[in-house]
Image (cartoon, grey):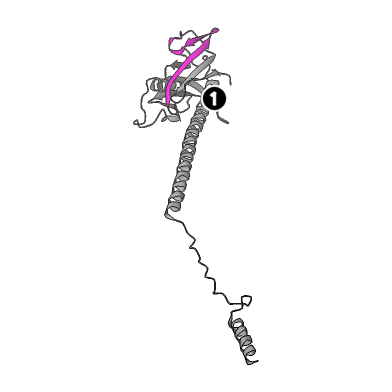
């Protein structure tokens, strides 16, 4: 009996001391390794390269816009100058003095890069008077000069000679022909023809007996391939 008890004890002890595989055993804590989030050197270089490429594209686009704006502004200023010049020329031609008022003289003399005429000036509550107008192209600039209005034909003759000979009157005690006003720049040529007796005549070659009724003005600008052509009626006002 004691032998059987010892044998049972020996069998039970190993089973008691054997670790229970199904029992809960605490596992060691899990250590999470956090990766540092940032840009590597290669990623940074790629980003800088992309930004530089975009900046170059933007600079080229901005430069094109600025150049186009400058060109458009120049064209607008040039167009505005031409409109003002033609409007002033139309007013002067419409008020051209009648040949009957100026005996033995033509009220208009047209040539290459120059135009001189006598126009009538009307003022409220004042009698009509005469005025000498001179258009000139010098150093690529179209200017207009006008004299003081007068009813004295002798004074008008003196003003006409001053205008035709391009005499500078700014140094005289009194300025009989006012300084020129700039109408248009970048002018390379100004040519004119007169319409009389059913045909066109060059201004410098028109015979004295020709009484013109129309004036053709061709204006050539430096930045344009074609001439600007306009026809005015003389004495139409």
Q: Point out residue 127 in the picture as x, y percentages from the top left corner.
A: 55, 26
- Between 9 and 78, the residue placed more toward the observer is 9
Left or right: 219 in relation to 235:
left
The answer to whether residue 146 is visible is: no
How would you rate the neighbour count of disc 1 (Cα within 10 Å): few for under 14, some for 14-19, many for 20 or more? some
User: Residue, x 39% and y 30% (percent of image)?
Assistant: 175
Question: As displayed, is residue 20 above or below residue 230?
Answer: below
Q: Is residue 63 visible?
A: yes
| Magenta run includes residue 149 | no
In the foreground, 82 or 152: 82
Image coordinates for residue 190, horizontal then vertical, percent: 44, 20
**198 inside magenta stretch:** yes
The residue closer to the viewer here, 223 or 125, is: 223
Q: Residue at x 48, y 19 (%)?
A: 218
What residue does disc 1 label? 91
> What range is drawn magenta here?
185-209
């Amino acid at each position: 009996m004691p032998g059987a008890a010892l044998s049972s004890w020996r069998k039970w002890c190993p089973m008691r001391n054997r670790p229970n595989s199904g029992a809960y055993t605490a596992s060691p804590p899990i250590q999470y390794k956090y990766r540092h989030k940032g840009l590597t050197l290669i990623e940074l270089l790629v980003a800088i390269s992309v930004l530089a490429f975009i900046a170059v594209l933007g600079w080229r686009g901005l430069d094109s816009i600025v150049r186009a704006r400058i060109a458009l502004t120049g064209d607008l200023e040039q167009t505005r100058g031409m409109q003002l010049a033609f409007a002033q020329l139309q007013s002067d031609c419409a008020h051209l003095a009648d040949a009957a008022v100026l005996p033995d003289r033509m009220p208009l003399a047209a040539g290459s890069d120059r135009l001189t005429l006598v126009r009538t000036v009307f003022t409220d509550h004042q009698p009509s008077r005469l005025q000498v107008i001179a258009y000139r192209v010098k150093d690529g600039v179209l200017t207009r000069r006008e004299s003081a209005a007068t009813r004295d034909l002798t004074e008008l003759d003196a003003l006409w000679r001053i205008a035709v000979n391009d005499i500078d009157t700014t140094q005289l005690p009194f300025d009989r022909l006012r300084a020129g006003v700039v109408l248009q720049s970048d002018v390379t040529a100004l040519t004119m023809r007169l319409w009389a007796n059913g045909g066109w005549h060059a201004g410098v070659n028109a015979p004295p007996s020709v009484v013109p009724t129309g004036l053709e003005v061709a204006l050539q600008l430096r930045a344009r391939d074609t001439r600007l052509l306009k026809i005015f009626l003389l004495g139409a006002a």
